[in-house]
Amino acid sequence: MKTAIRLLFILLCLCGIALSAVSLYNHYAVAATEYCDFGQTFNCDIVNRSRYSVFLGLPVALIGLCGYAALLGLTLSGNRWARIARFGFAILGFAYSLRLTWIEARVLGTWCVLCLGSLLAIAGILLLSAIDLRDSPKSIPEHPGVRDASLNELG
């Protein structure tokens, strides 16, 4: 992977981690946030404290934080399997982020600036992952624990 693309991956992952960490802090905060309150149209508090901010008992921001950290780890790994996994996780993250954005627009009627920033970060990671897979060699190196199936056949 080219150095510039790798640095962009790292930057987007770190942005996602930062946005998710701030969202997680706001999720548990009792005071209103001033930097993200622009009336009813843009209000992170409404979004971060709604019933949609929790999935399977976990704050969505925590899931995002862990997801971006995993994407960062996969990026730093750099092998072909990690790049394929990163692309798969980026698809899942982007799809879920789109779902949450739809909820903001259609159900809550308000937008979260932090969430929109996270949507942009995961969209960038997904796009770069697709480009990285397209430009990388097509052959997948053998996994160290797996032998060629033809060697295991009898006769």
Image (cartoon, rainbow, N blue to C red):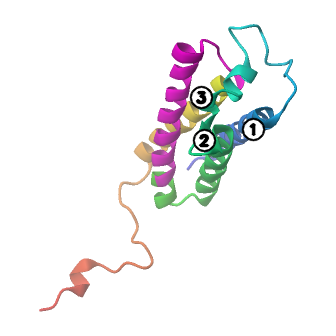
Between marks 2 and 1 in the image, the one whose residue lies nearer the viewer: 1
Residue ranking furthest to the bottom: 155
- Foreground residue, 4 or 119? 119
Residue that label 3 marks:
119
The segment highlighted magenta reads 85-114
36 left or right, relative to 76: right
Q: Main secondary structure of the magenta part?
A: helix
Q: Which residue is pictured at 84% across the width and 19% down the height? A: 35
Could you say which disc has been placed on residue 24 in the image? 1
Q: Which residue is pictured at 16% across the width and 91% down the height? A: 154
Looking at the rendered structure, the secondary structure element under dot 2 is helix
Residue that label 2 marks:
5
Sequence-wise, which precedes: disc 2 or disc 1? 2
Q: Is residue 109 magenta?
A: yes
Hey, which quadrant is residue 155 in on the image?
bottom left
Amino acid carrying mark 2 in the image: Ile
Vertical placement of 82 versus 142: above or below? above
* Residue 54, percent from left and from top: 62, 37
- Foreground residue, 6 or 48? 48
Local packing at callout 1 (Cα closer than 10 Å; few below 14, some 14-19, many 20+) is many
Looking at the rendered structure, the secondary structure element under dot 3 is helix
13 left or right, relative to 99: right
Amino acid carrying mark 3 in the image: Leu
* Residue 105, percent from left and from top: 55, 14
- Callout 2–callout 3 Cβ contact below 8 Å: no
Sequence-wise, which precedes: disc 1 or disc 3? 1
Q: Which residue is pictured at 75% across the width and 38% down the height? A: 24
Amino acid carrying mark 1 in the image: Leu
* Residue 132, percent from left and from top: 49, 44
